[in-house]
Amino acid sequence: MKPGGTLVIDFFNASEVRRNLVPYDERIANGITIEQSRVITPDDRFVEKTIRLRERGREYVERVRLLSAGDLEQMLEAANFDVAHCFGDYDGSPWSENSPRTILFASRK
């Protein structure tokens, strides 16, 4: 990215995910039962989601790192970016521990 360019990162709010993780849900789409189970790994660093397509006998595992707003800001600063804004949702509300999202606007130094 050229100096002065803007980068936007939209990530879930890790603290909100920890508090409100939905451990299991199930739905039917196109005649296929989709089961999703979620756990936070014992080291508290990842959300692991298992997706089962019951009728097809398939299973997929997705693993997403839990990063705080501070973690993301440090990574951006280490990559030569200045964080200009941190929002908590798509409506531009300020970030807080209870925000659903972590949306960072940063510019390249």
Image: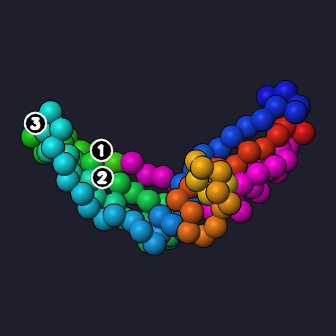
88 in relation to 8, above or below: below
| Quadrant in the picture for the N terminus | top right
Helix, strand or loop at mark 1: strand
- Residue at x 66% of width, y 61% of height: 95
Residue behind mark 1: 60
Helix, strand or loop at mark 2: strand
Query: Which comes before the other along the chain, label 3 or label 1?
Result: 3
Amino acid bearing label 1: Tyr
Question: Between tags 3 and 2, which lies in front?
Answer: 3
Q: Find out whether the residues at labels 2 and 1 contact each other: C-beta distance under 8 Å.
A: yes
Crowd class of label 1 (few under 14; some 14 to 19; many from 20; radius 10 Å): few
Residue behind mark 2: 50
Q: Nearer the viewer, residue 57 or 102?
A: 102
Magenta segment, which residues?
Answer: 62-86
Q: Nearer the viewer, residue 76 or 13?
A: 13
> Residue 33's spot in the image, x, y percent?
14, 45
Residue behind mark 3: 31
Amino acid bearing label 3: Gly
Mark 2–mark 1 distance (CA, rounded to whole Å): 6 Å
Q: Is residue 40 left or right of residue 78?
A: left
Q: Is residue 33 left or right of residue 46?
A: left
Crowd class of label 2 (few under 14; some 14 to 19; many from 20; radius 10 Å): some
Query: Which comes before the other along the chain, label 2 or label 1?
Result: 2
